Image (cartoon, grey):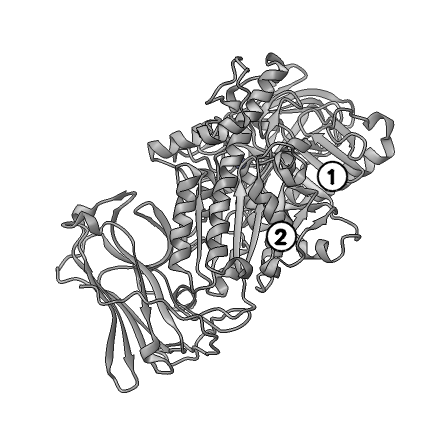
Amino acid sequence: MRRATVVVLRATLVVAVVLAVRHWTGARPPRVGRASGTPAWDLLTLARADPVRPAGRIIGARQAYGETRAVVATPIPDSFTYVVTIPAGAALDLGYAVQALVFPAEAPDLAVPTRLQVEFVDAAEKAHSLLDRTVDIHRHPADRRWFDVRVDLAPYAGATGHLTFRASTAESNPGPTSALFSAPRILVPPAADEPNLLLVTIDCLRADHVGAYGYPRPTTPTIDALSAEGVRFAHAYSTAPMTIPSVPQLFTSTLFPAEDQPTFLTAVNGAGIPSAAFVHNVWIILWLTLGRGPAPPDGFDELVSVDARGNAITDRALEWLDRHRDDRFALYLHYLDAHSPYRPRPRQAALFRDPHYAGPVTEGFDAAAAGPASSYTAADRLAAAALYDAGVRYVDDELARLVRALRADGRLDRTVIAVTADHGEEFGEHGGFFHGRSLHEELIHVPLVVRLPGAAHAGTVVERQVRALDVAPALLDWGRLPAVPALTGRSLAAALARPGDQADDVVATATNPQFPTRYALRRPPWKVIEEVGDGSVALYATDTDPAELHDIHGQHDAETTRLVGDLRAARAVLARRGYQVVVIGSPARAVPYRLTLEETAATGSLATMDRIGDPSGDRVTLTTDGRTLELQGAADARPRGVRFDRPSSPLGGSAQDSLQFTLDVDGAPSDGTSVRLGSDGHAPSGDRIALDASLESPATPPCPTPDAGVRVCLWRYPTALTPVGSPAVHDAATRERLRALGYAQ
Ligand SMILES: [Zn+2]
């Protein structure tokens, strides 16, 4: 029988101090508090800081029953105790579940009935049960779920005592059963100056299809209204034309995000703020749960992949918001309804579709598979855009439901709402449909609208260029949370306060192997795009040619050289990270060479390719499956080559991987004697280079010029930073969803 009661807290202002100490040591506790206002008691933070952790107790992200939650997962039996002082007006908030996991599958048939208890023992040794519930996922299918409880702590206000969490069973052998306590916290109502955070990303939403950005069709009445009540950043730029790495860049506020890298959630979690993400794009889920350990450092309390239309995301969000109606919150939503294949709902489709159009672009149009735009008429392209617009309007209508709910319960004016996109979408402007294939404006100019608490700065338009990297620091800034030093962006608040200051350069990356690797730098009035494969460069004038139709680099050599130099400097970090391949010839004469490196197993892909040196005339080609890299040119005494990362593939296996190499010098095959690997320059075995620790070199190894022919040196920096990849996905349905998003090989 569940004794916990769900209690709605009165929103009274409370100043309280909660101290927690390790029961068994009596040591003074780590202070767990919010940056401002009242501290909160947060079990995950305390448990993570525990120097002693019994075998089997895991603090981290755990997927169960369709959600990934931040949990303390305990073996059966287990218990842990902290000393707490209960503040006035407080409630204990937690979720729990029981799971039996035989990796990687759920095995409820092997679970034992598990008793979960939370108990408060006061100074007079009187025990008060806060939760006492036996969960039997073997016999009761209805128990195979998360339970969320909220316990009013008002009766214990001011009391100091021991808070114990316990999982036990009457059975002698618990098997693979574990108890999951998700995000247990003692929460008090937030102070007036502690705003909530709501971040919304709309997949593929290009800025110029938003009403507030001048689009004449009625795609975005809600975003337009938020803009009127808030701040619109007229020149906001995503830093990649695809979800990965665009969303990781947004969260980490860095251009080349890696696994286990801090995100803005570090500050959210440190402040003990309940958080959740409801996301429709499985890539984002994979990335947000990625990490080498069981505990990605900066996850959400609840991360839910909502593989359905946007209304399901809104419904889940509203339920969660209702559960946290008296708490400060941080909520992230990602809508996919404008993404190809375009399948708008009839109500929105009717607003945009041309009833007289009878061409080939119909509902379900798959932009990713559409082929070149040249095989479509102007009317076809308009038809594709109309289907897309209807999807945008659908998401906007969902946003309207959210805003209405927050306005109705009085939270709108206590919430920072940021709405943006991970990237845009192309409708033939530069030869194609979909996204990912270029760094032109239609793919990286995104809407960015922020409604601040109390509608501060209502109606302000900031013309100064800003970046997706600036969003996370701004959320912390406006959310009155401490800065996270690893975030490299500059808070949008600075652009708002000093619109006339020099803007930061936008540096954008298109580094997924499906499309040619490109880097861009935008510094009005110029934008330069460099293609790594053939070393070509294009320059555009942002003010006179916003559509980027005229490459004028030949007319502005000095500008081009300077911008390309700055663009290379911006990605110099790559030269100290990942795999590096250097080809060097003899000073005597330039020798034609061709080097191919081919993955022998698809456990990852080669990505984030970039050139080493500046060997004009050399070509670097990466096949669209990311598995074969080819360098071709004429080697002289100047080192030239390529660097790359090797993110793990969600569709990859677990086989030991290697690169098979072939090297032609002067048109004749060359064997491995000219190849040096790792820090010691050892030779490969046969034509295989094992992708293992033997390749590592903490510093740039020597790669001397050969007396004749060419030398190839290949090594990997033993960096702690693993590039953003993806854990292997074994579930067939998820693999299919990845393919459906148009990315997976
Ligand atoms: Zn996307």
**Residue 74 seen in the current view:** yes
Taking the spot 36% from the left edge, 70% from the top edge, the residue there is 91
Total numbered labels: 2
Q: Nearer the viewer, residue 640 or 259?
A: 259
Taking the spot 81% from the left edge, 28% from the top edge, the residue there is 553
Residue 211, x across and y down, in percent: 63, 38
**Residue 717 seen in the current view:** no
Ligand 1 within 8 angstroms of badge 1 C-beta? no
Which three-letter amino acid code belongs to the residue tagged 2? Glu
Ligand 1 within 8 angstroms of badge 2 C-beta? no
Q: Give the quadrant of residue 12.
A: bottom left
The kind of secondary structure element at disc 1 is strand
Question: Residue 600, labelled with which disc?
Answer: none
Contact (Cβ within 8 Å) of mark 1 with mark 2: no
In this image, 270 relative to 122: left or right?
Answer: right
| Vertical order, 146 against 519 (above or below) | below
Classify mark 2: residues with Cα within 10 Å, few (<14), some (14-19) or many (20+). many
Question: Which residue position holds label 1?
Answer: 522
Residue 500, x across and y down, in percent: 80, 52
Taking the spot 74% from the left edge, 46% from the top edge, the residue there is 463
**For the residues marked 1 and 2, what is the alpha-carbon distance in whole angstroms?**
29 Å
Q: Residue furthest bottom?
A: 124
Which three-letter amino acid code belongs to the residue tagged 1? Arg
Q: Nearer the viewer, residue 524 or 718?
A: 524
The kind of secondary structure element at disc 2 is helix
Residue 655, x across and y down, in percent: 39, 33
Question: Which residue position holds label 2?
Answer: 229
